[in-house]
Image (cartoon, rainbow, N blue to C red):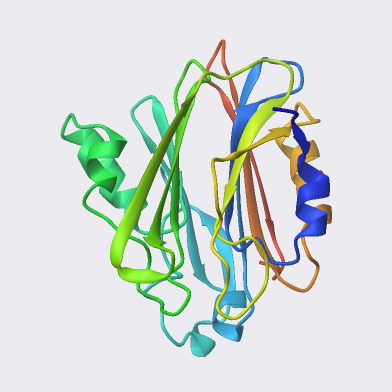
Amino acid sequence: MKPLDLMQELRRNPYPGRGIVLGRSADGNRAVIVYFIMGRSENSRNRIFSVTGDGIRTEAYDPSKMVDPSLIIYHPVRKVGALTVVTNGDQTDTIMEALNEGHCYRHALLTRTFEPDGPNYTPRISGVMKPDGSYDLSILKSFNGNPDFCNRYFFAYDGVPGGYGHFIHTYRGDGNPLPSFEGEPELVTIPANTAAELAGLVWDSLNAENKVSLFVRTIDLATQETDDTIINKHPQ
């Protein structure tokens, strides 16, 4: 499979929704985590990423404008022991609880389904980065838009040096209803070594009208030291 140019993929899609990229830096020395959110409604766009003790959370930029927090306020990234969990919803906490009880992330996600936001039935996408740079990705989605059935897909990858990663996102593009992501995560190139450099490239490639917030973390595979960059469309 020929790797795709991540920035080109972002530029050609005006609305990938929420997205996760897991992989390795261009020099091969760092694990890479990317998570971004986009929005079409005022409620979805009224968000920022803020730092917590074990990761990040979404919060309302203007609390007075928050309409329904149920699917848009959550912890996208949490550190659980040596693992880093990243998801597009409150399944982050489901995975964290399962890991703390000695189970795996797959065990946790078998208890969850897609989001109850018909007619879109937005997929739940999740990833786990391991200390050796290997990682897992998953997607929970409705069966061809039928909310009576859930398809659960799980993928496991060795971290390959040289700036390679995998990209999974919620939507194939804009539409009504929004068309869900299809197939396995996309093999992409990661043309950067630092969190700040990669964040700048990704942010500039996301649709200017729809992008909301971006988080990038690199993890030194030798020392496990992390370097984070957050970009919010709304100033803090």
Q: Nearer the viewer, residue 129 or 176?
A: 176
Q: Nearer the viewer, residue 117 or 202?
A: 117
Residue 164 image position (x, y, % from top left): 69, 26
In this picture, residue 57 sits left or right of residue 113: right
Q: Quadrant of the C terminus?
A: bottom right
Residue 179 visible to the viewer: yes
Check the image and report above or below for 6 versus 43.
above
Quadrant showing the N terminus: top right
Please identify the quarter of the rendering in which residue 223 is found: top right
Percent position (x, y) of residue 8? 83, 47
Q: Residue at x 38, y 61 (%)?
A: 143
Q: Is residue 227 visible?
A: no
Task: Identify which residue, 20 or 33, lies in the foreground.
Answer: 20
Residue occupying the point 82% across, 56% down: 11
Seen as rendered, the residue at the extreme top is 222
Q: In the visual, does 72 lie left or right of 149?
A: right
Residue visible at 75% across and 60% down? Answer: 13
Residue 37 place in picture, x, y as percent? 60, 61
Residue 4, how many percent across, how many down? 76, 37
Instruction: Quadrant for residue 3, please give it.
Output: top right
Residue 68 as seen in the image, left or right of residue 62: left
The count of marks equals 0
Q: Residue furthest left?
A: 101
Q: Residue at x 64, y 60 (%)?
A: 172
Please identify the quarter of the rendering in which residue 222 is found: top right
Eyeballing the image, is 157 above or below 196? above
